Every structure is written in structure tokens, then in C-alpha cells.
Image (cartoon, rainbow, N blue to C red):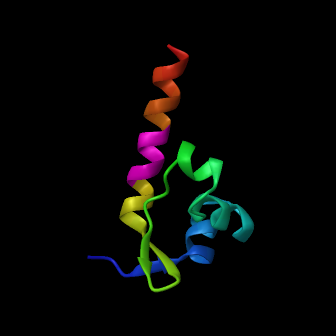
Amino acid sequence: MEPLMNLEEAGKFLGLTRNQMFELTRERSQARRAVRLPVVRIGKRCMVRKESLQQWVLDMERRSHDTTN
């Protein structure tokens, strides 16, 4: 299993800012409800596996194609 990335590292991988990443993980965020980022909460920290992010991107692409067809 790959080591976990923090939100800054995951944001760099996705091309998102730190604030955008935090918005995707906030419990009451509308963005989070729309696109659930695959995070693991360890105490107050949110961590992400690179493999999970890659799968998340593929799922988002599929959803995008499904809604446009």
C-alpha cells in the first residue's frame, strides 16, 4: 500500500490550491457533497492515498461523460 499524502500534496497532484482541498473535505461544504474526496481522517488530519485520488479522478470523468450524453 502506498503511503498517505496530506492535503497539500494531494492538491499539488490534482492541481488544486490548499483552500480548494480543504473545501472539498469540510463536513458542511456543498462542494464536498457534490464530489466526495476519498479522505482518511486521522484525528484532525485528512490524508489521501494517491491510488484513491487516481480512481476518484476516473470516476469524476465517467460522471462527466454520463451527464453529457
| 69 shown above or below 13 | above
Query: Who is closer to the viewer here, 41 or 10?
Result: 41
| 30 shown above or below 11 | above
Q: Is residue 51 left or right of residue 53?
A: left
Q: Residue at x 42, y 55 (%)?
A: 54
The spot of residue 66 in percent (x, y) is 45, 22
Q: Which residues are magenta?
A: 55-60
**What is the magenta segment's predominant secondary structure?**
helix
Query: Who is closer to the viewer here, 67 or 24?
Result: 24
| 14 shown above or below 58 | below
Q: Residue at x 57, y 52 (%)?
A: 32
Residue farthest along the bottom direction in this orientation = 43
The answer to whether residue 12 is magenta is no
Q: Residue at x 43, y 43 (%)?
A: 58
The answer to whether residue 57 is magenta is yes
| Count of numbered labels shown in the rendering | 0
Query: Who is closer to the viewer here, 1 or 45?
Result: 45
Q: Residue at x 61, y 57 (%)?
A: 28
The spot of residue 12 in percent (x, y) is 63, 69
**Quarter of the image that includes the N terminus:** bottom left
Residue farthest along the top direction in this orientation = 69
The spot of residue 56 in percent (x, y) is 43, 51
| 42 shown above or below 52 | below
Residue farthest along the left direction in this orientation = 1
Q: Is residue 5 left or right of residue 30?
A: left
Q: Is residue 68 left or right of residue 22?
A: left
The spot of residue 61 in percent (x, y) is 49, 36
